[in-house]
Amino acid sequence: MGYKNITMGGMVPLKTTQILETLEEIKPLLKSDTRVHLLGIARPESFADFIKFGVTSIDSTTPLQQAFKDRKNNYHTPDGPAYTAVRVPQFDANPSLSRKIKSGVIDQDIARHLEKNAMNALFEYDKGALSLDKALETVLAYERLHSGEKEAEKIRADYERTLGDRPWKQCKCNICKAIGINVIIFRGAERNRRRGFHNIQVLYSRLQRTLSQRSEELS
C-alpha cells in the first residue's frame, strides 16, 4: 500500500522470542525504505536483533515506571541486572503507615525517629562514615515498622546488594552525579522520578552502544 512508516503494537505481553519471530516473518515483506516502530517495547538485550529485522525506532515507558512501580528492578545499569531501591517512606505520607499511626497500631514518635535514623544512616554510609552492616540494620529497623518483619527479611539481600555495590557511585549520568545516593532511595515523587530519568538515560546509552557496534560491523 506504499506505507513508509509502520507501527507495531499489542506486543508488550509477548515474550522476546515471539516478538523476534514476528519481526522475522514480516522482514521479507518490507521495502528497503520502510521504517518499523515498536510500540511499548524496550528490551535492550535484543536491540541488535530488532535492527536486523528492520526496526528503526522504539518507545517504552517501562524504564520510567520500573523506577517506582516494580518491586525490585528500580535502578537500571548499562551492564548486568537492575538494583532494588531502598524504601524509606515518609511516615506521614505513606498511606499504609499513616493508617497504622492513626489507628494507634504504631506510635508516631517512634515512626518519625526510625525514619530519620534510616535517612541519616544512608547519608553517613554514602560519606564513608558508617559501615554497610550498620546502615543496613538501621534501614531494616524502619522497614520492619512499615512493612513487617517478614517483608523486611525478604528484602534484606536486595538492599545489601544495592548498598554494597554502590551503583550510583559508578554511574556517569547527570542524575547520579547531581543527587548521589538519593537516586536509590525510594521516597517521594521527586527522587523516584529522577531514578526513572536515570533509567531512561541507561536505555538510551545501551541503544547508542548497539548502534555504534552495528555501524562498525557494516563498515
Image (tube, grey):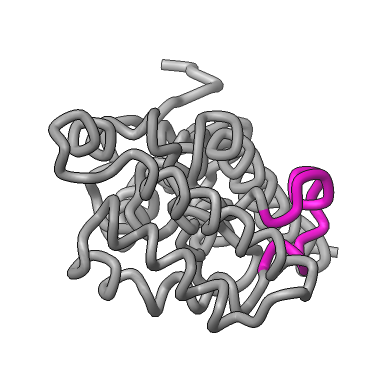
Q: Is residue 22 above or below residue 56?
A: below
At x 23%, y 65%, the residue is 151
At x 83%, y 51%, the residue is 177
- Highlighted range, magenta: 167-181
Give coordinates of residue 154: x percent, y percent: 26, 73
Relative to residue 204, is residue 83 drawn left or right?
left
Residue 88 falls inside the magenta stretch: no
Q: Is residue 108 above or below residue 120?
A: above
Relative to residue 79, is residue 107 drawn left or right?
left
Q: Main secondary structure of the magenta part?
A: helix
- Quarter containing the C terminus: bottom right
Q: Does the image show residue 31?
A: no
Relative to residue 212, is residue 202 drawn left or right?
left
Q: Does the image show residue 101?
A: yes
Relative to residue 131, is residue 127 drawn left or right?
right
* In front of the other: 120 or 1: 120
At x 63%, y 78%, the residue is 165
- Quarter containing the N terminus: top left
